[in-house]
Image: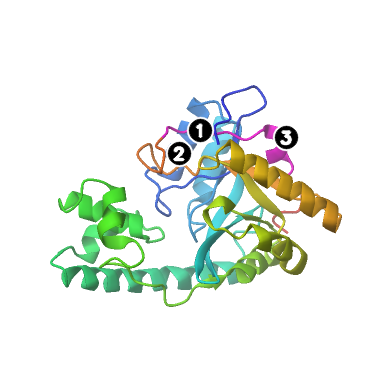
Amino acid sequence: MRNRMMTSQNSDLHMHSTASDGGYKPSELMVKCKKVNLEIVSLTDHDSVDGIDEAISKGKELGLQVIPGIEFSTKYKGKSVHILGYQFNYKNEELQSMLSEQKQLRRKRLDQIVDKLARVDIMITPEQVLKHTDGGSIGRPHVAKALIEAGYVKDVAEAFEYYLAEGKPGYVEKDKEMTVKEAIDWIHRTNGIAIVAHPDYYGVDEDLIDWVRDWGLDGIEVYHRDHDEKAVKRYEQLANDIDLKLGLKLYRTGGSDFHHEEYGRVREPLGMSRLSNHLAERLFKLDNLG
Protein backbone atom coordinates (compact mmCIF):
# COMPACT_ATOMS: atom_id res chain seq x y z
CA MET A 1 0.00 0.00 0.00
CA ARG A 2 1.47 3.32 -1.02
CA ASN A 3 -1.21 5.90 -0.32
CA ARG A 4 0.92 9.04 -0.51
CA MET A 5 0.27 11.95 1.79
CA MET A 6 -3.01 13.74 1.05
CA THR A 7 -5.18 15.96 3.22
CA SER A 8 -7.74 13.22 3.88
CA GLN A 9 -5.25 10.32 4.06
CA ASN A 10 -3.72 10.86 7.46
CA SER A 11 -4.61 7.61 9.23
CA ASP A 12 -2.61 4.49 10.08
CA LEU A 13 -4.39 1.69 11.92
CA HIS A 14 -1.61 -0.89 12.11
CA MET A 15 1.63 -0.35 14.04
CA HIS A 16 3.70 -1.95 16.79
CA SER A 17 5.65 -0.75 19.81
CA THR A 18 8.05 -2.27 22.32
CA ALA A 19 4.98 -3.75 24.03
CA SER A 20 5.40 -6.46 21.37
CA ASP A 21 8.08 -6.49 18.66
CA GLY A 22 8.29 -2.84 17.63
CA GLY A 23 11.37 -0.67 17.93
CA TYR A 24 9.88 2.32 19.77
CA LYS A 25 8.09 2.82 23.06
CA PRO A 26 4.39 3.70 22.60
CA SER A 27 4.96 7.36 23.48
CA GLU A 28 7.93 7.58 21.11
CA LEU A 29 5.82 6.04 18.37
CA MET A 30 3.08 8.63 18.89
CA VAL A 31 5.67 11.42 18.56
CA LYS A 32 6.76 9.90 15.25
CA CYS A 33 3.12 9.76 14.12
CA LYS A 34 2.68 13.44 14.90
CA LYS A 35 5.87 14.37 13.05
CA VAL A 36 4.56 12.84 9.81
CA ASN A 37 1.15 14.51 10.24
CA LEU A 38 -0.90 11.43 11.01
CA GLU A 39 -4.21 12.22 12.73
CA ILE A 40 -5.96 8.90 13.48
CA VAL A 41 -3.80 5.97 14.57
CA SER A 42 -4.05 2.62 16.33
CA LEU A 43 -1.42 0.73 18.28
CA THR A 44 -1.92 -2.95 17.41
CA ASP A 45 0.72 -4.88 19.32
CA HIS A 46 0.89 -8.65 19.01
CA ASP A 47 -1.25 -10.33 21.69
CA SER A 48 -0.66 -7.39 24.03
CA VAL A 49 -2.50 -4.32 25.28
CA ASP A 50 0.32 -3.17 27.54
CA GLY A 51 1.16 -0.10 25.47
CA ILE A 52 -2.34 1.25 24.85
CA ASP A 53 -2.67 3.53 27.89
CA GLU A 54 0.69 5.14 27.18
CA ALA A 55 -0.18 5.61 23.50
CA ILE A 56 -3.57 7.15 24.29
CA SER A 57 -2.10 9.48 26.92
CA LYS A 58 0.67 10.70 24.62
CA GLY A 59 -1.76 10.90 21.73
CA LYS A 60 -4.05 13.24 23.66
CA GLU A 61 -1.07 15.43 24.51
CA LEU A 62 -0.15 15.63 20.82
CA GLY A 63 -3.67 16.00 19.44
CA LEU A 64 -3.83 12.51 17.91
CA GLN A 65 -6.92 10.30 17.93
CA VAL A 66 -5.70 6.92 19.19
CA ILE A 67 -7.91 3.88 18.70
CA PRO A 68 -7.28 0.93 21.07
CA GLY A 69 -6.00 -2.00 19.02
CA ILE A 70 -4.44 -5.46 19.13
CA GLU A 71 -3.20 -8.07 16.65
CA PHE A 72 -4.03 -11.63 17.66
CA SER A 73 -1.91 -14.51 16.39
CA THR A 74 -4.09 -17.44 15.31
CA LYS A 75 -3.90 -20.64 13.29
CA TYR A 76 -6.31 -21.66 10.52
CA LYS A 77 -5.86 -24.98 8.70
CA GLY A 78 -2.22 -25.01 9.75
CA LYS A 79 -1.56 -21.45 8.57
CA SER A 80 -0.70 -18.45 10.72
CA VAL A 81 -3.42 -15.82 10.42
CA HIS A 82 -3.52 -12.49 12.23
CA ILE A 83 -6.77 -10.89 13.41
CA LEU A 84 -6.86 -7.22 14.33
CA GLY A 85 -9.15 -5.92 17.05
CA TYR A 86 -10.25 -2.29 17.39
CA GLN A 87 -12.28 -0.24 19.86
CA PHE A 88 -12.52 -3.10 22.34
CA ASN A 89 -12.49 -2.87 26.12
CA TYR A 90 -8.81 -3.59 26.59
CA LYS A 91 -9.21 -3.31 30.38
CA ASN A 92 -11.61 -6.25 30.55
CA GLU A 93 -10.34 -8.52 33.36
CA GLU A 94 -11.06 -11.77 31.53
CA LEU A 95 -9.16 -10.52 28.49
CA GLN A 96 -6.27 -9.36 30.65
CA SER A 97 -6.07 -12.78 32.28
CA MET A 98 -6.01 -14.56 28.92
CA LEU A 99 -3.28 -12.27 27.59
CA SER A 100 -1.24 -12.85 30.75
CA GLU A 101 -1.44 -16.58 30.12
CA GLN A 102 -0.36 -16.00 26.51
CA LYS A 103 2.67 -14.05 27.74
CA GLN A 104 3.66 -16.92 30.06
CA LEU A 105 3.42 -19.38 27.16
CA ARG A 106 5.63 -17.11 25.06
CA ARG A 107 8.21 -17.04 27.88
CA LYS A 108 8.20 -20.85 28.01
CA ARG A 109 8.61 -20.96 24.24
CA LEU A 110 11.63 -18.65 24.48
CA ASP A 111 13.43 -21.16 26.70
CA GLN A 112 12.68 -23.88 24.16
CA ILE A 113 14.00 -21.76 21.27
CA VAL A 114 17.21 -21.01 23.17
CA ASP A 115 17.67 -24.74 23.88
CA LYS A 116 17.14 -25.67 20.21
CA LEU A 117 19.58 -23.03 19.00
CA ALA A 118 22.21 -24.36 21.42
CA ARG A 119 21.99 -27.74 19.68
CA VAL A 120 23.39 -26.09 16.52
CA ASP A 121 26.03 -24.16 18.49
CA ILE A 122 24.14 -20.87 18.53
CA MET A 123 24.68 -19.79 22.10
CA ILE A 124 22.43 -17.05 23.46
CA THR A 125 20.62 -16.74 26.79
CA PRO A 126 16.99 -15.85 27.57
CA GLU A 127 18.31 -12.70 29.28
CA GLN A 128 19.94 -11.55 26.01
CA VAL A 129 16.52 -11.81 24.37
CA LEU A 130 14.44 -10.35 27.19
CA LYS A 131 16.49 -7.12 27.22
CA HIS A 132 14.87 -6.34 23.85
CA THR A 133 11.27 -6.87 24.98
CA ASP A 134 10.81 -3.89 27.33
CA GLY A 135 8.61 -6.17 29.45
CA GLY A 136 6.20 -6.73 26.56
CA SER A 137 5.06 -9.75 24.59
CA ILE A 138 8.02 -11.98 23.60
CA GLY A 139 8.33 -12.90 19.93
CA ARG A 140 10.83 -14.35 17.49
CA PRO A 141 11.90 -10.85 16.34
CA HIS A 142 13.31 -10.35 19.85
CA VAL A 143 15.34 -13.55 19.44
CA ALA A 144 16.50 -12.20 16.08
CA LYS A 145 17.76 -9.02 17.76
CA ALA A 146 19.76 -11.08 20.23
CA LEU A 147 21.26 -13.09 17.37
CA ILE A 148 22.28 -9.89 15.62
CA GLU A 149 23.80 -8.48 18.79
CA ALA A 150 25.74 -11.73 19.35
CA GLY A 151 27.12 -11.56 15.80
CA TYR A 152 25.44 -14.67 14.40
CA VAL A 153 23.43 -12.84 11.72
CA LYS A 154 23.49 -9.39 10.14
CA ASP A 155 19.76 -8.60 10.25
CA VAL A 156 16.29 -9.88 11.23
CA ALA A 157 15.61 -11.33 7.78
CA GLU A 158 18.75 -13.46 7.96
CA ALA A 159 17.86 -14.62 11.49
CA PHE A 160 14.54 -15.93 10.26
CA GLU A 161 15.96 -17.38 7.05
CA TYR A 162 18.59 -19.47 8.82
CA TYR A 163 17.26 -20.07 12.33
CA LEU A 164 13.76 -18.91 13.28
CA ALA A 165 11.34 -19.54 10.42
CA GLU A 166 9.17 -22.65 10.41
CA GLY A 167 11.32 -25.70 9.72
CA LYS A 168 14.56 -24.00 10.78
CA PRO A 169 16.75 -25.13 13.72
CA GLY A 170 15.38 -22.62 16.24
CA TYR A 171 11.70 -22.84 15.34
CA VAL A 172 9.33 -23.92 18.11
CA GLU A 173 5.62 -24.34 17.51
CA LYS A 174 3.45 -22.59 20.06
CA ASP A 175 1.94 -24.92 22.66
CA LYS A 176 -1.48 -23.36 22.36
CA GLU A 177 -2.58 -21.43 19.28
CA MET A 178 -5.78 -19.41 19.22
CA THR A 179 -8.19 -20.10 16.37
CA VAL A 180 -9.55 -17.38 14.11
CA LYS A 181 -13.01 -17.84 15.62
CA GLU A 182 -11.64 -17.56 19.16
CA ALA A 183 -9.89 -14.29 18.32
CA ILE A 184 -13.05 -12.86 16.78
CA ASP A 185 -15.06 -14.01 19.80
CA TRP A 186 -12.62 -12.31 22.22
CA ILE A 187 -12.85 -9.06 20.30
CA HIS A 188 -16.64 -9.17 20.19
CA ARG A 189 -16.91 -10.21 23.84
CA THR A 190 -15.06 -7.01 24.72
CA ASN A 191 -17.27 -4.91 22.44
CA GLY A 192 -14.75 -4.54 19.62
CA ILE A 193 -14.44 -4.74 15.84
CA ALA A 194 -12.63 -7.74 14.29
CA ILE A 195 -10.62 -7.35 11.07
CA VAL A 196 -8.51 -9.89 9.18
CA ALA A 197 -4.99 -8.45 8.85
CA HIS A 198 -3.09 -8.39 5.52
CA PRO A 199 -5.11 -11.28 3.99
CA ASP A 200 -2.84 -11.46 0.94
CA TYR A 201 -0.38 -13.36 3.15
CA TYR A 202 -2.63 -16.38 3.71
CA GLY A 203 -4.41 -17.58 0.57
CA VAL A 204 -7.78 -17.82 2.32
CA ASP A 205 -9.81 -15.43 0.16
CA GLU A 206 -12.54 -17.99 -0.52
CA ASP A 207 -12.99 -18.56 3.22
CA LEU A 208 -13.51 -14.92 4.18
CA ILE A 209 -17.23 -14.87 3.38
CA ASP A 210 -17.68 -17.85 5.75
CA TRP A 211 -15.73 -16.04 8.47
CA VAL A 212 -18.06 -13.07 8.06
CA ARG A 213 -21.29 -15.06 7.89
CA ASP A 214 -20.50 -17.76 10.46
CA TRP A 215 -18.08 -16.08 12.90
CA GLY A 216 -18.98 -12.40 12.58
CA LEU A 217 -15.73 -11.05 11.08
CA ASP A 218 -16.36 -7.32 10.69
CA GLY A 219 -13.93 -6.32 8.00
CA ILE A 220 -10.79 -6.68 5.89
CA GLU A 221 -7.46 -4.88 6.04
CA VAL A 222 -7.60 -3.94 2.37
CA TYR A 223 -4.81 -1.35 2.43
CA HIS A 224 -1.47 -2.64 3.74
CA ARG A 225 2.12 -1.80 2.89
CA ASP A 226 2.58 -5.26 1.33
CA HIS A 227 -0.63 -5.15 -0.69
CA ASP A 228 0.24 -4.00 -4.20
CA GLU A 229 -2.30 -2.32 -6.45
CA LYS A 230 -3.57 -5.66 -7.74
CA ALA A 231 -4.12 -6.99 -4.21
CA VAL A 232 -5.87 -3.80 -3.10
CA LYS A 233 -8.29 -4.01 -6.03
CA ARG A 234 -8.92 -7.70 -5.28
CA TYR A 235 -9.82 -7.05 -1.65
CA GLU A 236 -11.90 -4.00 -2.47
CA GLN A 237 -13.88 -6.20 -4.86
CA LEU A 238 -14.08 -9.07 -2.38
CA ALA A 239 -15.40 -6.75 0.33
CA ASN A 240 -17.98 -5.39 -2.13
CA ASP A 241 -19.05 -8.91 -3.11
CA ILE A 242 -19.47 -9.99 0.52
CA ASP A 243 -21.46 -6.83 1.27
CA LEU A 244 -23.85 -7.59 -1.59
CA LYS A 245 -24.24 -11.29 -0.77
CA LEU A 246 -24.79 -10.81 2.96
CA GLY A 247 -26.41 -7.37 3.03
CA LEU A 248 -23.57 -5.88 5.10
CA LYS A 249 -21.13 -3.00 5.05
CA LEU A 250 -17.74 -4.44 5.98
CA TYR A 251 -15.04 -2.24 7.42
CA ARG A 252 -12.12 -1.56 5.08
CA THR A 253 -9.03 -0.73 7.12
CA GLY A 254 -5.33 -0.32 6.49
CA GLY A 255 -1.97 0.65 7.84
CA SER A 256 1.77 0.54 7.58
CA ASP A 257 2.39 -2.40 9.94
CA PHE A 258 5.24 -0.22 11.17
CA HIS A 259 7.70 -1.74 13.65
CA HIS A 260 10.77 0.34 12.88
CA GLU A 261 12.45 1.75 9.77
CA GLU A 262 14.45 -1.42 9.06
CA TYR A 263 11.48 -3.78 9.32
CA GLY A 264 9.53 -5.43 6.54
CA ARG A 265 9.73 -7.01 3.13
CA VAL A 266 9.97 -3.46 1.82
CA ARG A 267 11.58 -1.15 4.37
CA GLU A 268 10.04 2.26 4.75
CA PRO A 269 9.69 5.04 7.30
CA LEU A 270 6.47 5.70 9.17
CA GLY A 271 4.06 7.85 7.18
CA MET A 272 4.55 6.35 3.73
CA SER A 273 1.56 3.97 3.84
CA ARG A 274 -1.66 5.69 4.84
CA LEU A 275 -5.39 5.14 5.10
CA SER A 276 -8.15 7.59 4.19
CA ASN A 277 -9.54 9.28 7.29
CA HIS A 278 -13.14 8.51 6.37
CA LEU A 279 -12.40 4.77 6.57
CA ALA A 280 -10.69 5.14 9.95
CA GLU A 281 -13.54 7.27 11.30
CA ARG A 282 -15.98 4.40 10.76
CA LEU A 283 -14.32 2.65 13.71
CA PHE A 284 -15.35 5.25 16.26
CA LYS A 285 -18.01 3.99 18.67
CA LEU A 286 -19.44 5.81 21.66
CA ASP A 287 -19.73 2.63 23.73
CA ASN A 288 -16.38 1.00 22.99
CA LEU A 289 -15.48 0.71 26.67
CA GLY A 290 -18.85 -0.54 27.77
Q: Assign a secondary structure to mark 3.
A: helix
Q: What residue is rendered at 32% in x and 56% in y?
A: 142
- In terms of secondary structure, what is the magenta stretch mainly? loop
Q: What residue is rendered at 84% in x and 51% in y?
A: 244
Q: Amino acid at mark 3?
A: His
Say which label, 1 or 3, has the lower sequence index: 1
Disc 1 crowd, CA 10 A, few/some/many (<14, 14-19, 20+): many
**Could you tell me residue 40's position as x and y percent?**
62, 36
Quick check: marks 2 and 1 in contact, CB under 8 Å? yes
Out of 273 and 56, give the one closest to the viewer: 273
Q: What residue is rendered at 58% in x and 68% in y?
A: 95
**Residue labelled with disc 1:** 33
Image height of 113 relative to 286, above or below: below
Residue 56, quarter of picture: top right
Identify the image quadrant of the C terminus: bottom right
Q: For marks 2 and 1, give the CA distance.
A: 6 Å
**Residue labelled with disc 2:** 29
Disc 3 crowd, CA 10 A, few/some/many (<14, 14-19, 20+): few
Q: Assign a secondary structure to mark 2.
A: helix
**Could you tell me residue 49's position as x and y percent?**
52, 57
State whether residue 12 appears in this view: no
Say which label, 3 or 2, has the lower sequence index: 2
**Residue labelled with disc 3:** 278
| Span highlighted in magenta in the image | 268-284
